[in-house]
Image (spheres, rainbow, N blue to C red):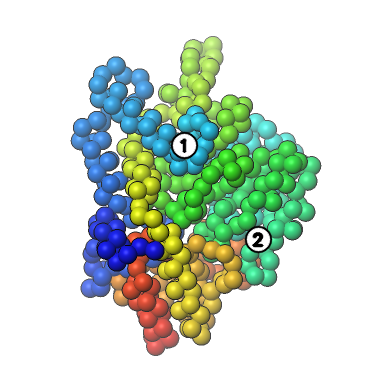
Amino acid sequence: MLSTTQLTELRACFPALHQNINCNQLIYLDNAATTQKPLAVLEAMDHFYRTDNANVHRAAHTLSARATTAFEAARERVRRFLNAASSDEIVWTRGTTEAINLVAASWGGSQLRAGDEILLSTLEHHANIVPWQLLAARTGAVIRVIPLTAAGTLDIAAGLALIGPRTRMLAISQVSNALGVINPLGELLAAARHVGALTLVDGAQAVGHLPVDVQALGCDFYTFSGHKVYGPTGIGVLYGRRDVLEGMPPWQGGGEMIRHVSFAGSTWNRIPLRFEAGTPPIAEAIGLAAALEFIATLPVGWREHEARLRDRLLAGLAALPFVEVLAPTAERVGVVSLRLGDIHPQDAGELLDQMGIASRVGHHCAMPLMQALGVEGTLRLSLALYNTEQEVDAVLAALARLPDFF
């Protein structure tokens, strides 16, 4: 656990937390959508733009050399964060969405044929559904979907039964963005490997809460977005196993991704540069590295602090008779999705905002999941390491008042 002093010092690192919204102190519980940024990230990006701003890799001047060094050091920082075998396995993207689109277009477009199967789950974000649908439409591949149990968790037995000789790709989230449920991936990934399928893990909702080791997971691809792990927007990561990346064609053409260009034809750069056409997100990569370093230097016990907040929130929600937590018994991070009886989530979210509480309402880019659960949308509350017990108690008190407005 974090001491009161440690938590106070930690919150002081996040300027956006210290403001009033509608005459109330901000309580930020929309962390699954995007996290706030610590001073370390803001200062790292500001320093780059003030002193080292230049393009990377090709110039002969000092600013470019400094920018390139910082940019490639950021790639190495991500490698260590994920425990990848080589920084060559780290590809910069704009986010998880672009990373999945890259894999679908490059690997999928070159490898899949009619009748090949792509296995997804009901819990997926649209970013891990739509790119595969577009690919299936182009190639004739077939999408299979792992269903849910009555408890709102993945039906692992059904998923294992869907994996067979036609399975070419298993693409699945580590943590559900809509429910906060942690998916037990071990058996599914192992079964996919057994039949020769590749595996992609969407880690967007996991990296801010759980330690990640891609070698221990044994996945072929792992994706995440910087802005969900206290870094900037506009930057994401695709981890790809070296031998898989080396067999993939470029996705986009332009500068940096080439080795030689003539009108007779072109040859491609080494990985990962082959997949990074054009000027990359240099400042954003440096900001993401600062965010990961910030996490690495946090006091021991911050994950236990998050878990305690989650448990306090769940216990308080259980005492509100009109509130239903979706997948209430599942192992989860500090993300909960709520049905509120006859109260529409949008109305609830607007009322909470009037009390200074930032939440998220809607389908959370998971419409197939909402359909499976029989709801149009939910109110989602998502915690981060800078939230406090007092904030949890305040949102519980605010929720208890909601029936008085209807």
Q: Earlier in the sequence, mark 2 or mark 1?
A: 1
Within the image, what quadrant is residue 94 found in?
top left
In the rendered image of this protein, does residue 67 appear above or below residue 165? above
Quarter that holds the C terminus: bottom left
Secondary structure type for disc 1? helix
Within the image, what quadrant is residue 65 found in?
top left
- Closer to the camera, 187 or 33? 187
- Closer to the camera, 350 or 269? 269
Picture coordinates of residue 355 (x, y %)? 31, 75
Check disc 2 and report the residue beneath it.
154
- Closer to the camera, 139 or 108? 108
Secondary structure type for disc 2? loop
**What residue appears at the point 69 percent right and 61 percent down from the top-left corner?**
155
**What residue appears at the point 35 percent right and 19 percent down from the top-left corner?**
58
Picture coordinates of residue 25 (x, y %)? 26, 70
**What residue appears at the point 33 percent right and 43 percent down from the top-left corner?**
290
Q: Which mark is residue 22?
A: none
Check disc 1 and report the residue beneath it.
79
Picture coordinates of residue 292 (x, y %)? 38, 45
- Closer to the camera, 53 or 181? 181
**What residue appears at the point 63 percent right and 64 percent down from the top-left corner?**
153
Distance from Cα at disc 2 to Cα at disc 1: 29 Å
Q: Is residue 351 visible?
A: no
- For the residue marked with disc 1, what is the amino acid? Arg
- For the residue marked with disc 2, what is the amino acid? Leu
